[in-house]
């Protein structure tokens, strides 16, 4: 009798599992629509222009042969029509200064008309040189979720050396005013993040920058190393002196433990140890970009999963397609993207750019500006 009962119960369970497996015969309200992984990107990054208001000493655009150009409004709108419903984050960034695009507001207004703030987080990565009062109001009123400014200095002298022709005091004031406006209106966003890439010209100001950033009202800051993947030449030329910077870095790391708003790359430099530790394991990949990120860094329309692939776009493995030749989803689900994803899953076959990349190895690489 007991055997029959157990048998019957198991039979019922298996039938339930079978029916649930074929969910389409169950009423639709019993299960939410689930996106298949990879079917759509959830993070779109657009470079609105290749032009910039300065030429930072450490910027990887120095060695790129970029044609001065602007992202066309019509292609942006069709891209948003296609990808917008699936996106969580839309970032205006790329290899230039996004606020230089004369139609920047048009892009944002089109996006917001179709997708409200609850649906889509807008992020701007900018040097802040064009952040006047009107633009500050616009960013706040359009509910930008995050605004990320590249500062890289704590004094006018250092700033002018690294980011020539830009106005340091003007930037500090603009950041302060942006935060003040948000607070006066009683809003939670934009989250204002300030970033500092450490070079030989500014390493001694890193701690001062942390203090200054919070005086300006920043919600979080990042102290980041130069990216070797973006430009090895600049990486080596601009390295801070190790003996002098190490104690500074240690103090900053202490600060990150005490204050969650301070973030600094957990494994500094070029990660040889992390690389060695994980080299022989076949399941060490922590980067999720290939599952979610659709990056259009250049106005010429090439698509990549990240800025490192963009920086080596002349290697054809790194180019997933071009938005002027195909639809976004054709590229996202196309043979090149699929091949790249497949090869990332096996360390022995992984793309060269990934094997050299800290994101590939480093599981702690999460920045607070994404929180
Ligand atoms: C290329 S900029 C474009 C947006 C804007 N012009 C800005 O500076 O914020 C995007 C980011 O790349 C970073 N970047 C540029 N060159 C770099 C390098 N060689 N190493 C690490 N980060 C770099 C900048 O600090 C900035 O945060
Ligand atoms: S402001 Fe940004 S894009 Fe322009 S040169 Fe500096 S880092 Fe590069
Ligand atoms: S591992 Fe690095 S190079 Fe490869 S897709 Fe991720 S971020 Fe890009």
Image (tube, helix red, strand yellow):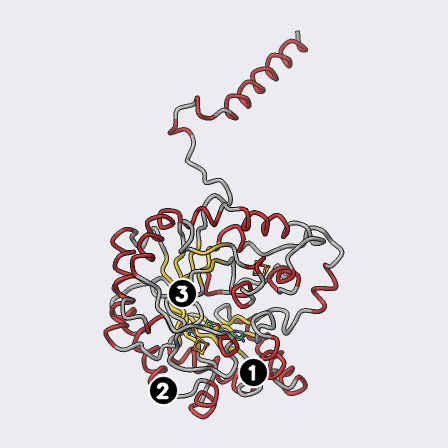
- 67 or 84, nearer to the observer: 67
Q: SS at mark 1?
A: loop
Residue at (63% x, 52% y) in the render: 344
**Residue at far right of view:** 280
10 Å crowding of disc 1: few (<14), some (14-19), many (20+): many
Residue at (35% x, 64% y) in the render: 71
Q: Which mark is residue 299?
A: 3
The span from disc 1 to disc 2 (Cα, nearest Å) is: 20 Å
Instruction: Tell me if residue 263 comes above or below residue 346 in the rendering.
Output: below
Residue at (39% x, 75% y) in the render: 51
Q: Which of the 4 image quadrants contains residue 102? A: bottom left
10 Å crowding of disc 2: few (<14), some (14-19), many (20+): some
Q: SS at mark 2?
A: loop
Residue 246: % across, % down: 65, 82
Label 2, on which residue? Answer: 167
**Ligand 2 found in image quarter:** bottom left
Residue at (36% x, 50% y) in the render: 84
Q: Earlier in the sequence, mark 1 or mark 3?
A: 1
Q: Which of the 4 image quadrants contains residue 173? A: bottom left
Q: Earlier in the sequence, mark 1 or mark 2?
A: 2
Residue 100: % across, % down: 33, 74
Q: Which mark is residue 199?
A: 1
Q: Earlier in the sequence, mark 3 or mark 2?
A: 2
The span from disc 3 to disc 2 (Cα, nearest Å) is: 27 Å
Of the two numbered discs 1 and 3 in the rendering, the one whose residue sits closer to the viewer: 3
**Mark 1–mark 3 contact, CB under 8 Å?**
no
């Amino acid at each position: 009798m007991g055997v029959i009962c157990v048998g019957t119960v198991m039979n019922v369970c298996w039938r339930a599992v079978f029916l649930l497996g074929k969910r389409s015969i169950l009423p639709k309200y019993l299960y939410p629509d689930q996106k298949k992984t990879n079917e759509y990107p959830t993070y779109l990054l657009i470079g609105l222009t290749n032009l910039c208001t300065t030429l930072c000493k450490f910027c990887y655009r120095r060695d790129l042969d970029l044609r001065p150009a602007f992202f066309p409004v019509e292609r942006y709108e069709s891209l948003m029509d296609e990808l917008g419903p699936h996106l969580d984050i839309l970032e205006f960034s790329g290899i230039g200064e996004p606020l230089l695009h004369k139609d920047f507001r048009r892009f944002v207004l089109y996006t917001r008309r179709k997708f409200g703030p609850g649906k889509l987080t807008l992020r701007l990565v900018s040097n802040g040189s064009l952040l006047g009062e009107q633009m500050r109001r616009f960013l706040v009123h359009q509910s930008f979720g995050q605004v990320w400014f590249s500062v890289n200095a704590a004094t006018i002298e250092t700033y002018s050396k690294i980011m020539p022709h830009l106005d340091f005091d003007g930037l500090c004031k603009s950041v302060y005013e942006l935060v003040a406006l948000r607070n006066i209106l009683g809003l939670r966003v934009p989250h204002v993040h300030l970033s500092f890439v450490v070079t030989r010209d500014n390493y001694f100001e890193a701690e001062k920058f942390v203090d200054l950033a919070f005086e300006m009202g920043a919600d979080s800051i990042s102290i980041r190393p130069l990216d070797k993947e973006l430009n090895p030449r600049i990486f080596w030329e601009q390295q801070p002196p190790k003996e002098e910077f190490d104690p500074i870095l240690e103090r900053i790391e202490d600060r990150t433990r005490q204050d969650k708003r301070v973030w600094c790359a957990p494994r500094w430099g070029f990660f040889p140890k992390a690389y060695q530790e994980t080299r022989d394991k076949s399941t060490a990949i922590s980067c999720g970009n290939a599952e979610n990120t659709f990056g259009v860094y250049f106005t010429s329309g090439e698509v990549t999963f990240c800025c490192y692939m963009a920086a080596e776009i002349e290697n054809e493995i790194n180019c997933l397609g071009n938005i002027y030749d195909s639809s976004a989803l054709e590229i996202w689900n196309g043979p090149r993207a699929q091949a790249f994803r497949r090869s990332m899953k096996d360390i022995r076959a992984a793309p060269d750019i990934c094997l050299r990349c800290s994101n590939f190895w480093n599981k702690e690489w999460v920045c607070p500006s994404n929180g």
